[in-house]
Amino acid sequence: MRKIYMFDTTLRDGEQSPGVNLNTKEKVEIALQLEKLGIDRIEAGFPAASPGDLAAVNAVARAVKNASVIGLSRSRVQDIDAVREALQGAEDPCIHLFLATSPIHRKHKLRMDKDQVLETAEKAIRYAKQYFNKIEFSAEDAGRTELDFLVQVTDMAIRAGATVVNIPDTVGYLNPAEYGHIFKTLKEQVPGIDKIQLSAHCHDDLGMATANALAAVLNGADQIEGTINGIGERAGNTALEEVALALETRFDYFGAKTGLRLNEIAKTSRLVSRLTGMVVPGNKAIVGANAFAHESGIHQDGMLKEKTTYEIISPETIGLKESKLVLGKHSGRHAFREKLIDLGYELTDEAVNAAFAKFKDLADRKKDVSDEDIRALLEEKLIDT
Ligand code: KIV
Ligand code: ZN
């Protein structure tokens, strides 16, 4: 079976979400949960960013035993040395080097021409190679880089010793067809491409991060980078739980799977949300509070007859107990009757009908009708009759 490696950057790109700051203890707690989830590679931070981050990456490196631990580094010696220090004690260390390659970044940020970019990146990879067996190189803003230059950059990175080449859509600019085309072209045109792994790293500025990552899988990507709950810079990164469940649910289409223990997803999502303070939107795919909740009568009736009518994933798959049938103005008699049984009421058909009419009246005035509301409504009804 084709395996897609999962590279989690919740502790690095995810921590770059405005307002998020994780201390060492919190980083270790999240890293250990990511390890339980079965993440293959954990990017723990950017050691050159601050002494605190260096110490946190080191604590993660020492705590994690069953995943590769990664430190981010610009293509410069001081950063590489900071990652060397931070990854001391790691079971399976990896350095993640990056340098921007797009014309916009070359001109305005780096003030380098193409040759200077190639030379700087090559020197950094060769320097890091003295100390690391595993080196990932990222062509930052690859999404807006000329494709023929990206072929050259990838070729240089492989010759210099990179073991993974990452193609970030840093600003979330591409659509799935365009992003997939990059992977297809690199696979076809770069000699030696099959000796290394190709990685996808997408941002969600146009809401296409998961779709782009899946397009990369269809075109030969070996690894997907992302975060739990999709947190990250600006609109965030690819949500890893979405990729994992898309591959699992549509194996018939993608023909590839991750090695994640999917029933750890809900727990991991809650932990990341609690420690980062980033609330998961109710309608968020896979981990939102409403992802397994049904309100309309037609859907509830279908669910009560056969769950696959309206659920393509079972809540148990991600470690939740059960789906929720939420009572509101769209709900039907079938779900209402089930709720009464759940609450311990055994009523005649006539009594259920009368209570249902009162419930509909209440639901028109109140968005969510709670168990307490239903009890109150029934007591009132019993007094009425
Ligand atoms: O989005 C990006 O380009 C990055 C790189 C550092 C890989 O996060
Ligand atoms: Zn990023």
Image (cartoon, rainbow, N blue to C red):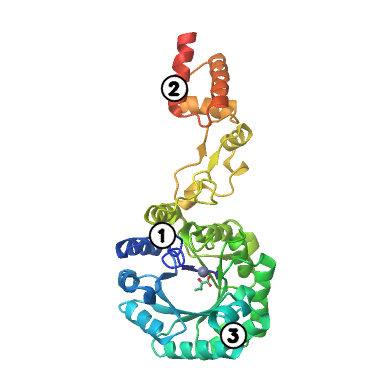
Instruction: Check disc 2 and give the amino acid type.
Output: Arg
Instruction: Check disc 3 and give the amino acid type.
Output: Val
* Separation (CA) of disc 1 from disc 2: 42 Å
Graded by Cα atoms within 10 Å as few (under 14), some (14 to 19) or many (20 or more), the crowding at tag 3 reads many
Q: Position of residue 247 (x, y in %)?
A: 57, 61
Q: Reading the chain from its start, which is encountered first: label 2 or label 3?
A: 3
Q: Are marks 1 and 3 in contact (CB under 8 Å)?
A: no
Residue on which disc 1 sits: 20
Q: Position of residue 171 (x, y in %)?
A: 58, 68
Graded by Cα atoms within 10 Å as few (under 14), some (14 to 19) or many (20 or more), the crowding at tag 1 reads some
**Mark 2 falls on what kind of element?**
helix
Position of residue 213 relative to residue 316, above or below, is below
Instruction: Check disc 1 and give the amino acid type.
Output: Val
**Mark 3 falls on what kind of element?**
helix
* Separation (CA) of disc 1 from disc 3: 33 Å
Q: How many marks?
A: 3
Query: Is residue 5 in view from this perspective?
Result: no
Q: Reading the chain from its start, which is encountered first: label 1 or label 3?
A: 1
Residue on which disc 2 sits: 375
Q: Position of residue 53 (x, y in %)?
A: 35, 71
Residue on which disc 3 sits: 153
Q: Is mark 3 within 8 Å of ligand 1?
A: no
Depth check, mark 1 against mark 3: the one in front is 1
Which quadrant would residue 117 be assigned to in this image? bottom right
Left or right position of 330 against 280: right
